[in-house]
Amino acid sequence: MTGRKKRITAAEIAKIAGVSRSTVTGVINDYPYIAEKTKKEVRDIIKAYGYVPNSAARVLVGMQPKIIGHFVYGQTGRMQNSYIESLMVDVISSAQQNEYSVVTSIITEDKADPVIKLLQDGTIQGAIVTGGGHDESELKTLFDSKFPVVFVNKFPADFNLAQYRNKHIVKSDNIKGGYLATEYLIKNGHTDIMHISGLHDRLSACDRLQGYKQALIEYQIPVREERIKEGNYTIERAEAIFDACITSGESLPSAVFATNDMTAIGVMRACRRDGIRVPDDLSIIGFDDLLLASEIQPALTTMKAGSNSLAASAVNLLLETLDKDEVSAQVKILDPILIERDSVRNILI
């Protein structure tokens, strides 16, 4: 049987098994509505005839592809977020160290690549999901599926995972990160601290804002809503926000806690154009510790969210899950680290 020169088709497999072609497809995709007895019979025939139409069939005949997916929600087709770019590179690097390849895709409203389809047809064995808000319709489908998925910085630490299997959350403690960044400014004598946040539907942005407020409250500093501005993680948006502050004629803060390094760099650009010296006139702290943060002048003080650690943790957790039949859901939280450089001035001295 296995010596046939002509490649056998799905229709022929269906005829031999006495089932419909759609049933063969359902067996390959491991659809739950197909009886286990039927699955076994069809799989035995697939193996006997060497039917290998795609990566899903290769899994059935023991030729399992070592491919995972990394999917980023809510980005434009042209990547403008250096943190996401860095995370992508680190995911690929961590996977390659384990002899896995990575299929990457940017998920936008006008290009909603069906992650679940790539999992169902066996193109990838598991997925890492980053970016975006909480309302992507595909997320529930992913949670309800049997496939291994790791969500990075997408759900709060107390999200109830008890009912799920092979689903995991890896995240930075962004509340703590926001708190430590703000506390560092306070300990350097700053009490008038502006926060330029990320988008309001992003968990990391909400958490960092919460940490900022907690630090102010704990140190008995009033939370002033006019000192909280919503950015979008880009240099251009942050520059426009701080330009507006400068031209408004109102007093400027003595320090800015930026939700990410790109936002911090945007504030620096506005300051440079208007003759505001960093850190002599304005102290700035960022978040993420991108490579660029250490190369600009002055070098940016920032919180290291651990993009490499996030990537490595997500990949390792996914591969551990792939090695087992079923794994209970896990939540892994990484502590942020303060990276002191030159963009914050101690005004107490």
Image (cartoon, grey):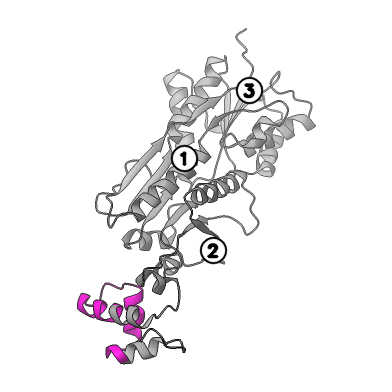
Mark 1 residue element: helix
The image quadrant that residue 106 belongs to is: bottom right
Q: Nearer the viewer, residue 207 or 91?
A: 91
Q: Which of label 3 and label 1 is nearer to you?
A: 3
* Residue 304 x, y percent position in the rendering: 53, 32
Q: Which of label 3 and label 2 is nearer to you?
A: 3
* Residue 213 x, y percent position in the rendering: 46, 29
Q: Which residue is mark 3?
A: 341
Q: N-terminal of the two: label 3 or label 1?
A: 1
Q: Which residue is mark 1?
A: 206
Q: What amino acid type is highlighted by mark number 3?
A: Arg
Q: What amino acid type is highlighted by mark number 1?
A: Cys
Does 145 sit above or below residue 84?
Answer: below
Is residue 121 shown to the viewer in this render?
Answer: no
Residue at left 58%, top 55%? 75
Category of crowding for the residue at label 3, using alpha-carbon neighbours closer than 10 angstroms: few (below 14), some (14–19), many (at least 20): some
Category of crowding for the residue at label 2, using alpha-carbon neighbours closer than 10 angstroms: few (below 14), some (14–19), many (at least 20): few
Q: Which residues are magenta?
A: 16-43
* Residue 300 x, y percent position in the rendering: 65, 28
Q: How many marks?
A: 3
Q: Which residue is mark 2?
A: 109
Q: N-terminal of the two: label 3 or label 2?
A: 2
Quadrant into which the C terminus falls:
top right
Mark 2 residue element: loop
Mark 3 residue element: loop
Residue at left 59%, top 45%? 86
Q: Main secondary structure of the magenta part?
A: helix
